[in-house]
């Protein structure tokens, strides 16, 4: 499990100060040689935004693999994304 905390402060040419405080974690789990699970959560305090995402990879054979992923954005304009891949 990985965690991240960050703080950024910037000053523009006009003298305005901008701040960004971010946080998050990433968790990866491989219960077998054929399955891999990843999850992450990231947020930013000043914008009131957070994103939860995850993916799973399944190895069916040496040449066939599938992936499923999702992402949920809990900001001012909430959104959801899903994706699948078979290769």
Image (cartoon, rainbow, N blue to C red):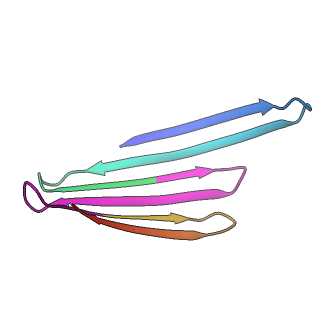
Camera-side residue: 59 or 37?
Answer: 59
In which quadrant will I find the N terminus? top left
Q: Is residue 69 above or below residue 43?
A: below
Question: Which residue corresponds to the image point at 17% horizontal and 54% vertical from the top-left?
Answer: 31
Q: Is residue 67 left or right of residue 77?
A: left
Q: Is residue 41 left or right of residue 45?
A: left
Q: Residue at x 12, y 54 (%)?
A: 32
Q: Residue furthest left?
A: 61
Q: Residue at x 68, y 57 (%)?
A: 48
Could you say which quadrant of the image residue 18 lies in?
top right
Check residue 62 for magenta coloring.
Answer: yes
To which quarter of the image does residue 8 belong? top right
Residue 77 rendering spot, x and y as whole percentages: 67, 68
Q: Residue at x 20, y 51 (%)?
A: 30
Residue 14 placement: quadrant: top right
The magenta-colored residue range is 41-67
Q: Is residue 30 magenta?
A: no
Q: How far across and how far down the image is residue 29, in percent?
A: 25, 51
Residue 62 position in % (x across, y down) = 7, 54
Quadrant where the C terminus sits is bottom left
Residue in the foreground of this view, choosing between 64 and 20: 64
């Amino acid at each position: 499990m990985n965690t991240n905390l960050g703080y950024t402060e910037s000053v523009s040419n006009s003298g305005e100060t901008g701040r960004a405080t971010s946080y998050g974690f990433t968790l990866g789990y491989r219960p077998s040689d054929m399955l891999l699970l990843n999850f992450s959560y990231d947020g930013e305090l000043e914008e009131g935004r957070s994103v939860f995402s995850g993916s799973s990879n399944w190895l069916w054979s040496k040449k066939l693999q599938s992936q499923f992923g999702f992402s949920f954005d809990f900001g001012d304009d909430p959104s959801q994304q899903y994706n699948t891949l078979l290769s």
